[in-house]
Structures are given as structure tokens and as C-alpha cells.
Image (cartoon, rainbow, N blue to C red):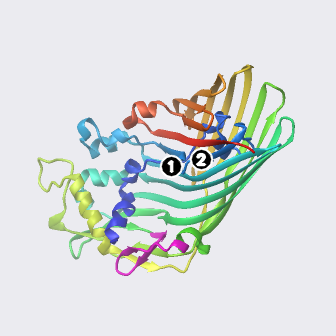
Amino acid sequence: MSVKFYTRTRIVLLMGWLLITAGSSAQESPHLFLLSDVPQSSLENPAIQNNTGKIAIGIPVLSGVNINLNSNIAFNYLFFDDFEYSFHQFFDLMSKKGKVQAGSSVSIFFASLRHNEYTFSVSVRERGSFNGNFDSEIISFIRDGIINYYGADQIVGSAFFQFRHYKEVGIGVAKEFWDGFDIGIRPKILFGKYFLDTNDFDLLATTDNQRRELHLIPYGTYFMSGPLSYVQSFRAKIIPGDYFFQAKNLGFAFDAGIVLKSDNATELSVSLLDVGIIGFGHNVFDMKMARPWRYDENKLYQSHSPKELRYLEPREALKIITDSISYLLEVEDSNSRAISLLPMKLNIAGKYSVASKTALGLSNQLAYYRRQPINMSSVFIHQTVGNRLEMAGSLSLFNFSRIGPGFGASYSANWMQLFIATNNISAFLYPSSSKHLNLSFGINFLLDTP
């Protein structure tokens, strides 16, 4: 596996492409706690008890898939009719600072059992998260070309990106201390797999007057850890022991929560999730751009006007840059260890039963990424239909700026349970224009207890 593969898929983040291609989530399943019959709702608050009356065992992978994207950039900023694209449109529509928080989780195993006042659960999940931002001026560099930078020394734009991938093994315990008051905790062991941190870097444009050259360079250092080796280029190095139980990539975290029912109609739920860290010390690399991109004065180009001289189509210009990264990047084995804080989340919700099978409520989730908090406030209604079907609808406010309608439903048969939930239905009706996307779904086997 060559360095070209990694640079195109990860270091090209410098140019903002990941904001378009990353399709996963920061807030992973904040709507699931509305579905009280779904055991996976305890992943949003470990104090929630298993109310199925059965042993719930999730189907691998299909027992819980969560995807989400929060960004201030929509897909159709770059692409429009027939997938024609325009960097000019992209630059004109985006904010001065492009931002994204993304993440996902896939359930490998889930099981939940209630015994008297206790609920025990085991969960194994593959999880990943991404956050970053970049100045819009970096896009103007792609949109317009480089000819205007010749003769000046300036910062084109600044950015940072961070990505982590890890396996999570959690054991949850919820206990009913007295009627209407439940406390739960879920300690978790984390096995880090991949980590990339660009730190804060600047894209610089400088001119070498003596050689009559324009130099472009991302000024900064980058840290990476993963199942890789490097000898002139990156190669895959996947060893089962390293992948699952590498001691140098261990992390620890916990979830905690309470559920308080003051009477038969009122319920309050509070939880704190993903309080923890992961250390990455195995197969670690320090990287930097040891040499700049060099453009001779006679090879400078512009990308904004096809009818004028020295025109180079923006996509072709970007391809030349990414293809050359492998020759300019300097990679060294690192002696350091990176400590990564997880994006922590705080959930608060309250609901009131207006009828025996109908409840109204309010909820709020705050997720904190590096200097980029994400807040989602919701009003919701919960309805039980018969003994098998529960449904929920919501109206959510994302970061106090954008409103989206949500929906959740679960159906429990004698031996199987299906569920689905989203906080933004409109994202699936108009996916190209959406800046907020989340979806949770799964299937459980329900087995009678002895």
C-alpha cells in the first residue's frame, strides 16, 4: 500500500475534501433514548432498564448502526445538476470558516438482560470520530489558481483535522435503588486502531525571487498512528494481536446516568457519556512537508477563467498537488505518545405522560469537540400503539440555528425487535442540501428468560 493512497484519502484534507466525502457522526444516537422498549437506548443513558421482559441479543452489525454528520457545508455547495461541480459556487456559499464534526459506530455485539432490580448489558462497538475546520481562503487557492500569489509572502489559510478509530468494549449495570429511581454506569475499555492529528497548520505561499519560483507548503507537523509500517512508503501492517489488544493503544472511558420518576407521569433523565481518553503509542509517526510545492514562474496557472491564458481546470490542479505529496512528505518513527480526549456528551431529557400511552417531553444534548461544541435541543412526543409498536416524533434545533423534524419507531414481535430513529427526516428527503444527518437502526433477537 503506497503513500499515495494515504495522502489522497487523509492529507488531502488540507484542501477540504473530507468535508464533502465524510458521511458519519458526532452525536451518534441521541434519539434512541425516546424508544423505551429498545435495549440499545441504554447506550444513551446506562440507567435505562431493559423493559422487554426478555434477553435481548443484537444481530452483529445490524444490532446497531449509527451515522451522523454535522457541518456548515452542504453537499450541493460543490455539486449541482447532473453532478456538475463548481469550486466557485463552493467558495461563494460556504462560511468564512468551514467546520465539520463527524463520527459513526457499528455494533459488533450487544446483549442485555434484566434480573429483578438490575439490568446487565455488554456491548462491543467499532467507533470513529472526526472533527476539523479550515479557512475558506484555502478553497480560493483551489478555485482561482496560484498565479496571484507570485511575488508575495502570505498565509493562504489555516486549518486543523483530527480523526480517531477505535474498538469499544463496555459492561453496563443499571440498578433500581428504589421505586422510580435508577442509576447506571458503563465502564469501557478502548482499543485504539488509527489516529491522525494535523494540529494547527498554515498553508503558506512564498516567493523565491532568486530562482523565480513560487513555493507552497502546509507549515506544521502531523502525528499518525495506525496498522502501518513505513520504509520509503506506507505499507499495511495488520497483526491480530496489535489490532485487538495492543497495550500501547489502550484507553479507558465511562458512561453514567440517572433516571428519576417522581410520580406516574413525570420522568427526568440525565447522562454523561464518553468521559475518557485513548493513548496512541504503537506504530506512531511524525510527519511534515520537508519540501514545498515548487512552481517555476513560467508554470504558474490560473483556474478561474477558461478563456484566459494559463488556465488549468481546478480538479486537475488539485490532482497534481495530491500526486506529488508522496515526494515531499517526510515521515519518521515517533518516540512520543499521543493522548486523545474523547468527544464528551451530556444528555438531559424530561417527559410528562399526558395519557396512559402518550408522553410529551424536552431534551438537550451537548457534545464537545476540540473548540467546536455541538448542541441539539428537541421537543418530542412519544406514543405507544398496542403492545408491540412505539413511535416518537420530534422537532430539533441544531446549534440554535437550524430546525429539523425527527422520527423514531420500534416494533417488538415475540422473538425479534426492529428499530429506527433519526433527528432530521428532511436530511433524507433532501440529502444534498443537508448539513445535519443522523440515523440509527438495528435488529435484536428477543429470547425468553429462564
Q: In the figure, residue 254 lies in which quadrant?
A: bottom right
What residue is drawn where x is 52% and y is 60%? 165
| Left or right relative to 298: residue 403 | right
Q: Nearer the viewer, mark 2 or mark 1?
A: 2
Label 2 residue SS: strand
| Left or right relative to 200: residue 27 | right
Observer able to see residue 62: yes
Label 1 residue SS: strand
On-image quarter of the N terminus: bottom left
Q: Which label number is shown at residue 334?
A: none
Q: Give percent across and percent down for residue 186.
A: 72, 53
Q: Is residue 295 above or below residue 305?
A: below
Q: Give percent across and percent down for residue 62.
A: 52, 46
Q: Give percent across and percent down for residue 56.
A: 65, 44
What's drawn in magenta, residue-wise?
Answer: 221-241
Q: Give percent across and percent down for residue 77.
A: 34, 40
Observer-nearest of 66 and 410: 410
Check if residue 222 falls in the magenta segment: yes
Q: Which label number is shown at residue 58?
A: 2
What residue is drawn where x is 38% and y is 77%? 330
Observer-nearest of 48 and 308: 48
Q: Is residue 127 above or below residue 64?
A: below
What residue is drawn where x is 23% and y is 76%? 210
Q: In the figure, residue 220 lies in which quadrant?
A: bottom left
Q: Which label number is shown at residue 101?
A: 1
Give the crowd class for mark 1: few <14, some 14-19, many >=20 residues within 10 Å: many
